[in-house]
Image (spheres, rainbow, N blue to C red):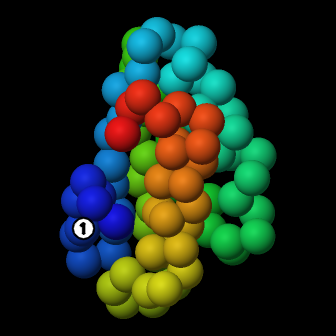
């Protein structure tokens, strides 16, 4: 989980892409493929950047569910946009 900022109930990371279209593609893919994780991250696109925020609204602290979702985001990045890592 390198690159993720960890707060008491939140994991946060920002990614920089080549352009807006690539950033949007990444955010769209994440939004469509996270249902199995029972968490829905906040995704914000600003120009060529995507900010991903994963919050635990049900329990105190970060659980394995949030960590697995962050790992999924990292895996998608490595697979679809390896130049960003």
In depth, the one of 60 and 6 nearer the eye is 6
Residue 36, picture quadrant: bottom right
The residue identified by callout 1 is 6
Q: Residue at x 62, y 68 (%)?
A: 39
Question: Considering the image in quadrants, where does the N terminus appear?
Answer: bottom left
At mark 1, the secondary structure is strand
Residue 44 versus residue 37: which sits nearer the camera?
A: 37
How far across and how far down the image is residue 70, in percent? 47, 63
Q: Looking at the picture, does residue 62 appear above or below residue 44?
A: below
Q: In this view, does 77 lie to the left or right of 6?
A: right
Residue at horizontal 36 percent and vertical 89 percent from the top:
60
Residue under the point 28% across and 60% down:
2
Residue 42 at least partly seen: no
The image position of residue 22, as x and y in percent, is 56, 19
Q: In this view, does 52 lie above or below 55?
A: above
Q: In the rendered view, would you say 77 is above or below 63?
A: above
Depth check, front residue: 80 or 24: 80
Q: Which residue occupies 25% across, 77% down?
A: 8
């Amino acid at each position: 989980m390198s690159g993720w900022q960890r707060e008491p109930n939140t994991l946060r990371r920002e990614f920089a892409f080549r352009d807006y279209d690539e950033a949007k593609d990444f955010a769209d893919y994440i939004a469509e493929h996270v249902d199995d994780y029972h968490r829905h991250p906040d995704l914000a696109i600003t120009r060529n950047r995507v900010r991903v925020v994963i919050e635990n609204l049900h329990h105190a602290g970060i659980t394995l569910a949030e960590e697995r979702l962050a790992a999924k985001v990292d895996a998608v990045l490595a697979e679809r946009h390896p130049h960003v890592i």
